[in-house]
Image (spheres, rainbow, N blue to C red):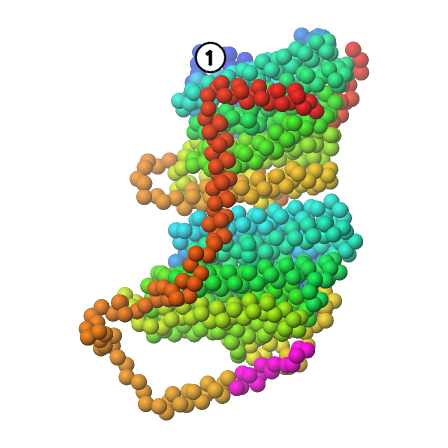
Amino acid sequence: MIALLVAVPLAFGFATVAFPKLSRYILPFVALFNLVLLLGFVHPSQVTEIGKWPAAYGIVLVLDNVSYPFLIFVNLILFALSISATYEDKLGVLLLVLTAALNGLLLTGDFFNSFVFLEIIAAVAYVLASQNKNSYAAFKYLIFGSVAGILYLIGVVSMYVYAGTLNMAYAGFVASPEYVQVAGILIVIALLVELKILPLGLWAPDVYSNGSTVTPVALGSAVTVAIFYLFSRIFFNILEPVKPMPVYVLSLISIVFAQLAAMKQKTLGRTVAYASIAGASTVMAVLSSGALGVEKIASAAYLYLFNEAISMFILFTIYGYLNHKGFKNNSVAGIAFSLASISLIGFPLTAGFWAKINLLTALFEAGDYILPAILLVATVIEAGYLIKWNVELWYVDDDSETEEMELPFGAQVVVLLFALALVIVGFMPDLVTAYTDKIASHIFDFKTYFDTIMKGGM
Amino acid sequence: MQSLQSLIIYLAVGTLIGYFLSKINKHLGPIVLFALSIFGLYALWGMPTGVTESLFGFEGVLKFTALSKYLSIVTLIVFACYGFFNISWISKAKRPAAFNALSILTLLGTLGVFFSAHLIVLYIFWEIAVLASLFIVPMGKEESRKATIWYVVISSIGTYLFLYGVFMLYERYGTFDIFEIAQHIQNASTGFRWAVVLLLLAAGIAKSGIFPLHVWLRNVHGNAPDTFSAVLSGQLVKMGSYLIALILSVFPIANMFSEFYNGVNILSYILIWLGNISILVGTLMAIKQNDMKMLIAYSTVANSGYILIGLATLHQVGYAGGLFHVINHALAATMIFLSFAAVVYRTGTTKIDEMGGLIHRMPVTFVTYLVGIISLAGIPPTSGFISKWMIFQALVSKGMFVTEMFVFIGSIGSFLYVFRPLAGVFLGQLKSKHKEVKEVPIIMQIPMIILVALTVLWGVFPQQVLVWITDVQKEFGMKPFEFEGTVLKTSMGYWDTWIVFVMFAVGFIIAAVIYMLMPKGKKIPLEDQYTSGEFLHNYDLYHYATKFYAFLEREYEGHPSFEDWYLSIVNTLKAFGKFVDYLARRTASAYIFWAAIVLALIMWVRW
């Protein structure tokens, strides 16, 4: 059953290659179908063996308590995207393929299979990045992304060499930590590129600020969440939880520099792009700080990721439609924008507040004083520039007689609902923390994962 | 009897109601705010202190202390006057619905801060107050948008330092309850005590505009919507003073820090010096301002300095004086800013040298301003005198003569700077363009008159305020300030406010009688005079308020500016940002370089 999550979007994607117009109408239904399937018909834990080949010999798709919430969230973002975004017809097919690949990445239990999905995502991402005549940025992303892809592949290959299998669970069972290190380093660098941690995320500002309503949302929200899943799966669940010090330090530097860069920007697009780098770096820093196996830290990190993804979705969508036009005639967009900003900063009564408070609590309890300090310094900077943009857009000098710009109805509904979601979670954080706690408790539990796939034996 | 939680809920609901009613008729929003403030006053006035309450099911996070009660009453008086004034003023507001709703939310936030015993709940309410006021500020003048950023950044610096301190405490003691923490903190190591107390105080210092985090006040108070400046200066700044008072009194500061000078501990001593510098900076900068709102904004810096000095002495008289100064400055700042709002309502400008002679046109506004500045400058029989006198007494008895000098300079300086708007705006010659100006509507006059009455009333009969203050002192185990009726007693003597008032009143009556008996002066129209042998035809030329204190300003012309210094830090940081942007705009091969560097780095370090 869970194979449908990959198969249905992929099938519709191929079927509509000849009818690009049709694809954009199918996309929302496919995303909705995925959501319905996930919420109503499948439940963790389930394993699908492709071609009836049992695990460790064939490819398996695994729906467990870790991938399940991630799948729901990613498909929700894709569904919202399919309603809110405006794009050329031909992109519909690509978004269907992206949906399939993201679901595949979240489900797969096989190293090489994950590489394939990763490359499909990257290929779609390059095309998306070139939207709005942004080919040079897309080209640079292509180069960076290809290097990352190759490193990931080498990592997978060396994993195969050491472990003798491509199955994630079995590889984790067999491989000894010393040998896994090389593979781990190669894989982590590939993921850092996709997660846009500076300096490996230098491609992101140009790509995200292209002014499209698809590119930054699809890449910044959906893909980033999926890659964070992959990172957690490989480094927390499969390989022994280790504390990757260089990644931690790199992320800390990335947070500060990204915030400083965001502060300097003169266009909203680039500001939010850098803010999104800073956000991803924060999650990365927290995860690599909590990689020792502290569930509370991981849970807080996923809540933070949730807040980032939703807030960034709102900010980028509104930027895509309104550019710097201001909210005078777009109060719905304005309210959503402001709520997303204050949630990003972490003011009370929003999801961002709980993300920040939970993070601080967990980090202090674990004895990490550096990250909270950096996080708070970064928040001061972030508050400065986000409020600056809010004020500028709310009180824009409208002597310019430019054409009226406003959000289409669908986009208005989506950003408003998402903004409301941030507020509701702000009042009832349990709605999300119930899931993130569950993820966190299972992500460090290798045995359950192994048993789920192997069914107790080979 | 009302509970604290229900009051908070009423205010939350009031925010929504205020918003939607304002959509129907913008004059309804301020009425909601006024009604809620009066209700709050009624509910809290007789509420017993020392009661612990739960909020939305969280046990024991609220505590109604005597300090909460005192500050809440001050706040509600300010908000009631502000709300009433707004009923008429709101027609000038840019976004009335949002303005009204956010005003109510600001009240909710600040009251919540005063009620919280749980540090995270306090932080939440604090941020609500900041957030709500944050979105009101840019509704002011053009420059207010830049000011908003000053506000949010300096405020965030304070609150996040505070938050870091709170979590350090939580990590050590496993609780967020300030009263519980206070029982343990004495046993902590010296370094930890210093770190935590300074971090917690940072929020109060930033909020109350104490040097070196004072720079935002000029921009924010000076550019915010006119009536909201009254709340900012009269009330929100007091939130900072509250936090400072809370920390200094709940924590056993005297036992935590070693004695440094005549029974004053080292932490208090540092705070007193920050207060000294604030007084000096605030006074000198206020003298320079040509914008009347910015002038009073700097005077707020100086007055926060007074409050801090009074509180930090932790002295029977000084602490009481500091608390008394809270209510005095709250009333005075509200009066002054409301009278300015009235002036701007009629003339449309805040520049002192663009006005003059408004005393003939706006007498009630003038009297409000006059009493406000008399109280601010600390002249009897207003209540402003009492608090300054108490702080003075404490400093003398502790032998802190240097600080006393600063306090004295601040007092003299305040005569100078409050005179500038008095002479420039209300006295002198009426500008021809203001000939048609009328007094503001009666609705705006009423709160101003009430504030005048309260200031004089508490100047003559300060008992009620002193009861609130001594309750605070008793609660925190301090020796309460001694007073009997209108006689205030210190170790060095006493002061009877009633006798002083009678003396002033008699003097005033004698002066009035002389004035009546003497021949009346002749009213001369402006053209009826000449200078240098020439008749004046253009009377605007004859009024001077530009470079009013040029002779003084010259003495400290090239002074270092913290505002510029902070801006240069921001520019330096932006240069780093530019560097990142530069890297991002390089070619693809440069990107590969970075990938290789990171790979090499991680390969080398491993993990």
Is the N terminus of chain A in the top left, top right, bottom left or bottom right quadrant?
Answer: top right
Residue at x-position 63% and y-position 12%: A154
| Observer able to see residue B125 | no
Residue A391 in the image, given as x and y percentages of width and height: 45, 45
When the figure is inspected, residue A36 is found, relative to residue B48, above or below; the finding is: above
When the figure is inspected, residue A129 is found, relative to residue B62, above or below; the finding is: above
Residue A304 in the image, given as x and y percentages of width and height: 62, 35
Badge 1 element: loop
Residue at x-position 54% and y-position 50%: B154
- Does the magenta portion include B501? yes
Residue A73 in the image, given as x and y percentages of width and height: 60, 28
Q: Is residue A124 left or right of residue A290?
A: left
When the figure is inspected, residue A389 is found, relative to residue B360, above or below; the finding is: above
Give the quadrant of residue A231: top right
Q: Is residue A207 left or right of residue B92?
A: right
Magenta extent: B489-503
Give the quadrant of residue B327: bottom right
Residue B594 in the image, given as x and y percentages of width and height: 55, 22
When the figure is inspected, residue A175 is found, relative to residue B339, above or below; the finding is: above
Name the subunit of mark 1.
A
Is the C terminus of chain A in the top left, top right, bottom left or bottom right quadrant?
Answer: top right
Residue at x-position 45% and y-position 89%: B510
Residue at x-position 64% and y-position 79%: B488
Give the quadrant of residue B205: bottom right
Disc 1: which residue: A17
- What amino acid type should be assigned to the residue bearing mark 1? Val
